Amino acid sequence: MRVLFLAAVLLVSLMGCGDGGSDPREEAFSFTYSGIRIRLNAEAAPIVNALGEPESYTEEPSCAFEGVDKTYCYGSFYLSTYPAGGRDYVYRLWFADAEAATEEGIRIGSTKSQVEAAYGENGFDGVNRYVLTKGQTRLILLLEEEAVSGIRYEVILD
């Protein structure tokens, strides 16, 4: 009887280990800067602390959430957060110059063919935008004259 009980407990505990039990924040785009991994929807405080003093910082009342949206500038990129449950979470990232690059090596100035080599052709929307979705996040690459002119990561709001 005891063995049967332990087998049932083990079976129930294993059922929670599949994809269905995972946190949707785990499947998200990320960006690494100076060895610091910045994942969308992650708690912002440890990331902001690791990045150090920003070049600039602004706050404004949130339109989509209760509380304050915060934006940090780290030279080559900006990071904005949203408030939820008394904490701030990474909401958006956008690149300011060609120093920052996606995990796949795409940066402002990369060619359309480099984007297609890194991400395939399915993300191009035909209107000078390349949009990829991962979990509740998206990566948007703006193209101008066959070259990347802007890169933005963002959380998808319901």
Image (spheres, helix red, strand yellow):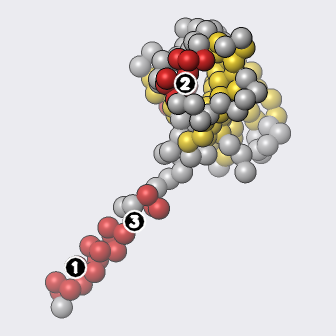
Q: Which mark is residue 6?
A: 1
Question: Which is more toward the observer, 132 or 152?
Answer: 132
The mark lying in front, picked from 2 and 3, is 2
Out of 87 and 62, give the one closest to the viewer: 62
For the residues carrying marks 1 and 3, which lies nearer the camera in this image? 3
Q: Is residue 109 left or right of residue 120?
A: right
Disc ID at residue 136: none
The 10 Å Cα crowd at callout 2, few under 14, some 14 to 19, many 20 or more, is some
In the drawing, does residue 34 fall left or right of residue 88? left
Residue annotated with mark 2 = 116
Look at the numbered discs 2 and 1 and tell me whether their residues touch, using CB distance below 8 Å: no
Numbered disc 1: secondary structure: helix
Residue plotted at (46% across, 27% down): 37
- The residue at 70%/26% (across/down) is 129
Residue at 65%, 30% (x, y): give it.
124
Is 114 positioned to the left or the right of 158 in the image?
left
Q: Is residue 33 visible?
A: no
| Amino acid type for the residue under numbered disc 1 | Leu
Give the residue pinned by disc 3: 16
